[in-house]
Image (spheres, rainbow, N blue to C red):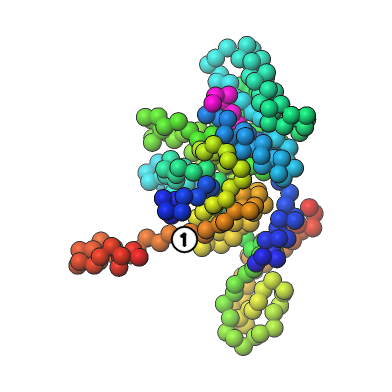
Amino acid sequence: VAERLHGLQQSRTLRRIVCATDLTVRSTAAWERAASLARRTGARLTLLHVIDPGQPARMRANRAYVELLSQADLAFGSAAGFIDVAVRRGNVRDIITRTADEWDADLIVLAAPKSRRLDSIVGTTAERLVRTAKRSVLVVRREMKGGYRQVAIAADLSSASLPMIRTAVRLGALDGACATVVHAVHPSYDGMMRAVGLGELTVAP
Amino acid sequence: VIEHERPELLAIGASRWFLLKRLLIGSVADRLLRAALCDVLVIPRRPAVLKLGAPIAVASDGLTPVPVRPDITAVARFVPVPRRLQQHDRADRQARAHE
């Protein structure tokens, strides 16, 4: 397994990362993480900002360009040539998906969504993106403090689990990390077992 | 696990569900995206495909110890590999050669 993982790491081909940012403080961790991954893997990075169709476009677009360029400069300094900057207008989810397809991105990075009242019904942008995108999506919630050291992989032991782990390796998510593979099982007849007085540890150890 | 191990990243697979099912009960990925306190990497699930180079466990009767391929440790004589999977495998091999 170690040999195979090593082989996978050698043959890694992470070529393009698309990082969607709303240019707020919330997105800082996302583009910092994306920049870190791009630096480590040699992938090209696209910083994308989507303008809502209901807002005046030109002024916002110009300002967004300037902010994205300054973020690129901040993240990569003199190597900022490895970063592409895109400002587009339209539905956020559609534009992110389309841009990722257009650049043939291996990974989409975006910040964790704010929790709003209607989200449980309509879903957040991240959730809708995850449902429709054919590419891996990294939702960044924490401020970046170096590479990931503790990683949990949820596997259902189906035939899709192994390709999933291989993709995680290919994306560099497990580099130098201590990984735990988790397989959660819902115990059958747990209600009945509890009803006859079996303890929690017996039902779901 | 997230509470005890406190991982910095959770990697999960996501399936593309039908709209009605999704609306009614949601997906594990959706719920984890909302609840997890760490970064979440969601990897889209591909259909069941045998990937070359991956270790493959196949049921064995213990009578056929000679591997038919280096990455398959044993194949039971009475459980043939389904033709559909062989086709997937061949397609993957071609895609890899093309890369």
Q: Residue at x 69, y 64 (%)?
A: A4
**Can residue A54 be seen in this snapshot?**
yes
Q: Residue under circle 1?
A: A183
Q: Is residue A113 magenta?
A: no
Q: Residue at x 66, y 30 (%)?
A: A47
Amino acid type for the residue under numbered disc 1: His
Find residue A78 and report its horizontal and vertical position in percent. 78, 29
Q: Quadrant of residue B90?
A: bottom right
Going by the image, does A42 lie left or right of A67? right
Q: Is residue A21 magenta?
A: yes
Q: Residue at x 66, y 65 (%)?
A: A2
Q: Quadrant of residue B82?
A: bottom right
- Tell me which chain the residue with mark 1 is part of: A
Find residue A131 and report its horizontal and vertical position in percent. 52, 42
Q: Main structural element of the magenta stretch: helix, strand or loop? A: loop
Going by the image, does A183 lie left or right of A177? left
Magenta stretch in the rendered image: A20-25
- Assign a secondary structure to mark 1: loop
Find residue A192 and report its horizontal and vertical position in percent. 24, 64
Q: Quadrant of residue A46?
A: top right
Asked if residue A76 is positioned above or below residue B7 in the image, the reply reads above
Asked if residue A75 is positioned above or below residue A147 in the image, the reply reads above
